[in-house]
């Protein structure tokens, strides 16, 4: 069975500072990895995903995540956060099997402080 | 609209009542998922449809939960004899394909409070 661990439930960070949101996964087969973001009063939306190929993937708003198979991690990073990045971030895994059963972590609330 | 639509957005039920939650996915999306999100938790998988076929219902917590998608578009999640532990946000998501590589598009959820 697949699972996702997000150790940090809340991460406060000052505006323009760097941030890393940690994600570790467990799966017995090859995986697809995702980060979803939920802005206040909105539904979850895909931020970025790793399917295959380059282990470093990027989003359009400056976030990046690196797939590390040996450490079973998929940490999310941004070199300089903005107030508008305040949201809850969910790491998720799919085993890439017959269909897309996506398993989510418990989420990390990123609070950007002005 | 072009997104996934869920209704009602908020539902308050007395313990023992039956509730029905509706999901209208993005037109043309083959796959439809229901998730349950309790307070402070991540979304937990409930069930999956590919068109009208319910291919996985392993996440449904009890036989009081029932989901259908009779014509392969709109889906309804029904909870019978609601209990307090059913209080949660119920999320619906759709995807163009079922291959595991596609993006899930989520609705804003239906928040159920059972008194």
Image (cartoon, coloured by chain):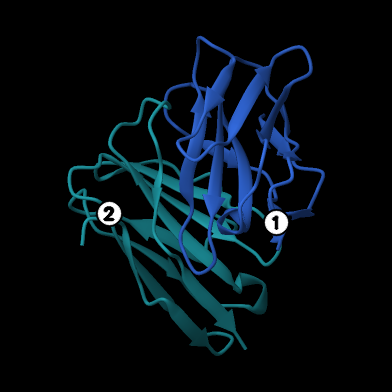
Chain colours: A blue, B cyan
Q: Chain of mark 2?
A: B
Left or right: residue B46 versus residue A109 is left
Image position, residue B26 (x, y; %): 24, 51
Front label number (2 vs 1)? 1
Residue at (37% x, 77% y) in the render: B8
Image position, residue B43 (x, y; %): 59, 53
Q: Secondary structure at mark 2?
A: loop
Q: Is residue A96 above or below residue B75?
A: above
Q: Furthest residue to the right?
A: A7
Q: Which mark is residue B25?
A: 2
Q: Chain of mark 1?
A: A
Q: Is residue A32 above or below residue B37?
A: above
The residue beneath circle 1 is A109
Left or right: residue B68 versus residue B82 is left
Pick the front one: B101 or B1: B1
Residue A96 visible from this viewpoint: yes
Left or right: residue B64 versus residue A83 is left
Image position, residue B84 (x, y; %): 65, 79
Crowding at mark 2 (Cα within 10 Å: few <14, some 14-19, many 20+): many
Q: Where, by quadrant of the figure, is residue B41 drawn?
A: bottom right
In what quadrant of the picture does the N terminus of chain A appear? Answer: top right
Residue at (59% x, 60% y) in the render: B37
């Amino acid at each position: 069975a697949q699972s996702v661990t997000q150790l940090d439930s809340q991460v406060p960070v000052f505006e323009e500072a760097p941030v890393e949101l940690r994600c570790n996964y467990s799966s017995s087969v090859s995986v697809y990895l995702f980060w979803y973001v939920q802005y206040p009063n909105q539904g979850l939306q895909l931020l970025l995903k790793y399917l295959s190929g380059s282990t470093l993937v990027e989003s359009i708003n400056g976030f990046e995540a690196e797939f590390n198979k040996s450490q079973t991690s998929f940490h999310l990073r941004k070199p300089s956060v903005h107030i508008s990045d305040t949201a809850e971030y969910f790491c998720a895994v799919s085993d890439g099997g017959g269909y897309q059963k996506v398993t989510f972590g418990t989420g990390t609330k990123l609070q950007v402080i002005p | 609209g072009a997104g996934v639509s869920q209704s009602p957005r908020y539902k308050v039920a007395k313990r023992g009542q039956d509730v029905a939650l509706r999901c209208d996915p993005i037109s043309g999306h083959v796959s439809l998922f229901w998730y349950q999100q309790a307070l402070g938790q991540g979304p937990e998988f409930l069930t999956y449809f590919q068109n009208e076929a319910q291919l996985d219902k392993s996440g449904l917590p009890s036989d009081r939960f029932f989901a259908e998608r009779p014509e392969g578009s709109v889906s309804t999640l029904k909870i019978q004899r609601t209990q307090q532990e059913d209080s949660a946000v119920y999320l619906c998501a759709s995807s163009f394909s079922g291959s595991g590589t596609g993006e899930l598009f989520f609705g804003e959820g239906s928040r159920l409070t059972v008194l």
